[in-house]
Amino acid sequence: MLVSVYRYNPETDREPYMQDVEVSLPEGKDLMVLDVLNLIKEKDQSLSYRRSCREGVCGSDGVNMNGKNGLACITPVSEVVTGGKLVVRPLPGLPVIRDLVVDMGVFYKQYQRIKPYLQNSTPAGGRERLQSPEDRAKLDGLYECILCACCSTSCPSFWWNPEKFVGPSGLLQAYRFLADSRDEATEERLAELDDPFSVFRCRGIMNCVSVCPKGLNPTKAIGHIRDMLLSRAT
Amino acid sequence: MVTNVLNYGRSGVADWVVQRFSALILAAYTVVMVVWLAVNGGELTFAQWQGFMGQTWMRIFTLLTVLALAGHAWIGLWTVATDYMKKGAVRVAFLGSVAISLFVYVVWAISILWGF
């Protein structure tokens, strides 16, 4: 199979280029894209990419495969290849450090901005803060985010304003804490988001939903935040 | 919180609400216009047209629509400009010309509606 990989080494290359590599796949087996990258790296040690758990838990190997973001380790080659060719590029919209490795700084900065931790100044009643099963259920579909950045880097609003628009991933996490019955900082959190960029740059095109490797729905969470901002303002 | 001096309301919620309310007004005006033209269309005379537009409710409705259009266009174009125009000077020049155009349209509409 023909694999086209994005290559860029800032120390030696003047500009990025696509490198075509012929990879022979084992018969009767559907490899994951990460396996294909590993096969290439066996031949060419200079190819750089992030990976760790190789089972869709750590979120390290988010890449763009044939135009769609996803985790290379849990994306079968058969699912993305069209016309017998696999094209692998780094996640779009973030600065490339080398080959498929991107600088996630601005993505983490937005995550940090939404204060992704419980804020509660009331002393806990017992050893821990209890939550009813119903309140706990509100966090389902929110807490599972692994911060792979597949969603935010597929979002044009995030491409154009990564410093100002929180992005789908950060907003999913923002709602995870807004929805938490143990968190007391709802007002402060909403005040921090009530500007024309942080939340309202979302135009609801749902690229985030279509690429999320964990099957989460940031657009829905953003809708909930918008509803909270609206009822706070009326 | 992200701030921007050229944003009208300084609030995303306010912009969002204005955008939707103004859209409703624009839609209602479009329906009224299309229906009236469908009923009276064909051989439309100046007297008919002036008689329709000269009614007090139609003048008020038209002015409301022009104001809604100005607000709607400002928020929409401000959003487009802050997405795609990365150079501050270009963006300010563009938004400045948008603001002047919208202001002229509003004044012009008032003079048409109440100037005769």
Image (spheres, coloured by chain):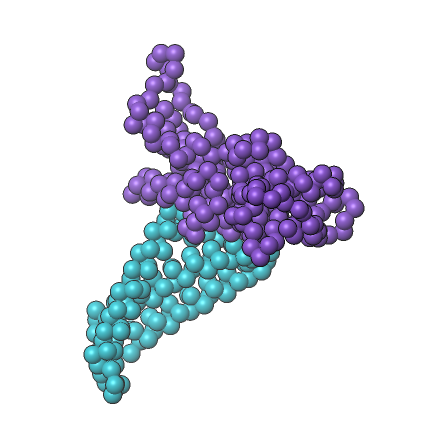
Chain colours: A purple, B cyan
* Residue drawn at 39 percent across, 12 percent down: A127
Quarter of the C terminus of chain A within the rendering: top left
Find the residue positioned furthest to the right: A12
Q: Where is residue A195, by image quadrant?
A: top left
In-image side of B109 versus B84 (left or right): left
Q: Position of residue B71 (x, y in %)?
A: 38, 59
Q: Along the horizontal axis of the image, is B41 left or right of A59? A: left
In this rendering, the count of numbered labels is: 0
Q: In this rendering, is residue A169 above or below B34?
A: above
Residue A23 location (% of width, % of height): 67, 47
Residue that appears at 39% across and 51% down: B15
The reply to whether residue A125 is in sight is yes
- Toward which corner of the image does residue A27 lie, by quadrant? top right
Q: Which sits in the foreground, B39 or B48?
A: B39
- Name above or below for residue B74 compared with residue B42: above
Residue at image coords 48%, 40%: A213
Estimate the x, y position of residue A143 in percent, counting from the top left: 43, 31
